[in-house]
Structure formats: structure tokens, C-alpha cells
Amino acid sequence: MKFAQVTGHEQLKERLRKNIDEGRVSHAQLFAGNHGWGTLQLALAYVQYLHCPNRTNGEPCGVCPSCVQMQSLTHPDVHFIYPTIKPKGSSTPPTSDLYIEQWREVVGENDACFDEHAWYEAIGADNAQGLITAKEADEIIRKLSYKAFEGKWKSVVIWAPEKMHPNCTNALLKILEEPWENTVFILISEHPETLLDTIISRCQSVNVGRIEQDALRSYATRSLGATEEQADVVAKLADGSLLTLRRVVAEGSDGSATDNFELFTRLMRLSYSNKHLDLFEWAEQVAAMGRENQKSFLEYSLRLIRESYMLTAGMESVSYLWGDEKAFCSKFAPFVANHNVEAIVAEIERALRDVGQNGNAKIVFTHFALAMSKLIAMRG
Ligand SMILES: [Zn+2]
């Protein structure tokens, strides 16, 4: 991956390439930030640039053997470590090599930007927590003991190091204490606060922040087919994350936002007209639609309630609404105000929690519909 393919982060890219250009390559670096902020993209561009013998204009050349191997994640001197699970029926602890095909696929399909959930799905982990096993540390040491095959550098990229088994952490710590020559470790972590202080203190930290709105906006039009107007809004909603951006755009086009909007507006209309029988019917419909859809609906409702409240509070300029949502919320906004907004939010959050804990959906949503109806009908 070239730096130009990394979404946003122009200043950080400049710093990273300058470090390499000026020969300041720290042997351990911690790229910290949400996966959606493009930490892995940056790390891949950095490593490709480091290994390329023909760097030009701040970019790896893209055509030399090193670059070609880097782009297909087959470079013999670049090792990837990530959480794995033990395959069914296997008795030996797994290492990353076992899942290298899936890794190449997931990185390729997602432009090197995906979360752990997507990774676990790709390796068939269901809800199983992945682990970077103790055996992985032996593998790292074995691989690093070879001379570099191609050039000067060897790199080890550890994705989600917070999933390291304690024995693996200890082995890594030993390696970092006595750095190997021309060997670079890149740790990519969403939760650096859960890593050992002794690991953190041995790494140069590369704090990756949110992706700039401008960069997300142009990604939305260029790669996701959004119109200029849509791109403005989705870039705001994405909150600096490429993953959220993709999700918001997908929701807009697969109709789930439309379904949620319909359910939400119907609930609100029934609520202020106090139609109890229809409310029960509404609750039954929602109860039948499956846990993931219920969560998606509740999260969507939370957003519209907050947006409506902002309109009531006269904060239209920070509101992220457009189209039908904006039209509805503008009319509906007076019903969400200081006297009830907190209670409404609490009800939605309670329903979210109950759904998450496998509560009986019919009971959860009947209660929810009645509670909402009471709160919406309340006058300030
Ligand atoms: Zn090259």
C-alpha cells in the first residue's frame, strides 16, 4: 500500500516518511488508535516504504520485487502476527501462519481497514475470543533468526497485540529489551492502555487520530459512490472512522435506515396520539425482527432523539440530519425537550441492554412502547 492509498492523515504520513528518509527508524513502534482510523493502512504503507529500495517522491515505487511482495502480503522479510483460534479438533496451539490466506484476503478485500469482529468472522471464530499464543513468540524468534532474504530490513507487524498470551508478551518484552539489528516491530493497537507499561515504554508511540472529514468526504464520493450532498453528511456522521463511514453509506443504500425510520416515526405518531392497541401491534412487529435488527433500530432511535433535541435546543448547525429525517425531526422536535429527553434516552438504553442480555423481546418492546408513549405525551 502506498501512502497515497491511505485515507487522510497527511501530516502523520509526512512525519513517518521523513523519519525513514532521515534514517530515524525506531525498532519498536506502537500505532495506537481505532481500527477504523486506518492504523493498519498506515503501518502497511510505512513498512512498504521502509523496505522499498527505489523510494521516489515520498512513496514506495510500487513495482520493485519488494513492493510487489508487500502488496500481496507475501514479502519474506515481513511477518504478520494477529489473534487466532484453535481449529476444531486440533490439539496444538495455532499461530498466525495457519491463517495467512485469510489474512491476505481480509486485508485485500477491506483496503486494510477492518475491525476484530470482521477478522474473527473470516477465521470462523463465531464469538470466540482470538489469542496470540505463546507458541507465536517461538515462531517470531525462529523467523527473525534468518538473515533478511531481500534487503536490509526485517519487519514484524503485530495486529491487536492486546490479545497476546502473557507468555508471548514476556517473550516480546525480551526481544524489545535487546533489539535485533535492522528489525522493526510495529504494534497496532486499539487499546494500548491494556498493554504492559514495560512494552509501551519500549515503543515509540505513533498516535493515529481520527481521519479528517475532508478525506472521508472524498473517499465517500470516490470509492462509495455517494453524491456531494450525501458525502457531506456521512463524513460528519462517520466521526473520523472509515469503518463507520462505510457502514453509514451501506445502511443508506440497503434500506435498513429507511426501515428504521419508518418504525421510529410510526412509534412517535402512535405515542402522541396515545393509540394503545396500535402500540402493542408495533411492539409485536419489532419483537419478531431479530436481535441485530432490534439493536440497529434502537441505536438509530437514539440518534434521532438526540438530533431532535439539538433542534429543540436551537443547535441546528451541529445537527446531522437531512432529507426525510430532517423534515420529521423538525416537526417532532418540540416533543423532546429538557423535561423528558434524559428519561427517553434512558428508556432506549435500557431496551438496548435488555436486548443484549437476551431479554424476552415481546416484553421488552411492549414495555418500551408504553414507556415511550408516556414520555412523549408528557408536556413540559
Ligand atoms: Zn519498491
Image (cartoon, helix red, strand yellow):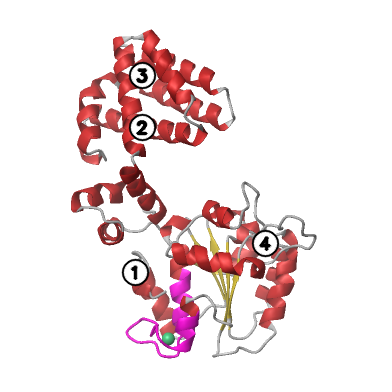
Pointer 4: what residue?
A: 132
Residue 75 is situated, as x and y percent measured from the top left of the image, at 54, 81
Dot 1: what SS? Answer: helix
Which circle's residue, 4 or 2, is located before the other in the chain? 4
Q: CA distance from mark 1 to mark 4?
A: 32 Å
Residue 101 is situated, as x and y percent measured from the top left of the image, at 58, 68
Pointer 2: what residue?
A: 260
For the N terminus, the quadrant is: bottom left
Q: Is residue 277 above or below residue 158?
A: above
Badge 2 crowding class, 10 Å Cα cut-off, few under 14, some 14 to 19, many 20 or more, is: some
Q: Which residue occupies 39% across, 48% down?
A: 247
Which span is picked out in magenta?
43-69
Q: Which residue occupies 38% across, 85% down?
A: 61
For the C terminus, the quadrant is: top left
Q: Amino acid at mark 2?
A: Asn
Which circle's residue, 3 or 1, is located before the other in the chain? 1
Pointer 3: what residue?
A: 340
| Image marks 1 and 2: residues in contact by CB distance under 8 Å | no
**In the image shown, does 77 or 111 lie closer to the viewer?**
111
Badge 4 crowding class, 10 Å Cα cut-off, few under 14, some 14 to 19, many 20 or more, is: many
Dot 4: what SS? Answer: loop
Which circle's residue, 3 or 4, is located before the other in the chain? 4
Q: Amino acid at mark 4?
A: Ile
| Image marks 1 and 4: residues in contact by CB distance under 8 Å | no
Please tell me whether mark 1 or mark 4 is closer to you in this view: 4
Which circle's residue, 3 or 2, is located before the other in the chain? 2
Q: Is ligand 1 closer than 8 angstroms to the Cβ of mark 4? A: no
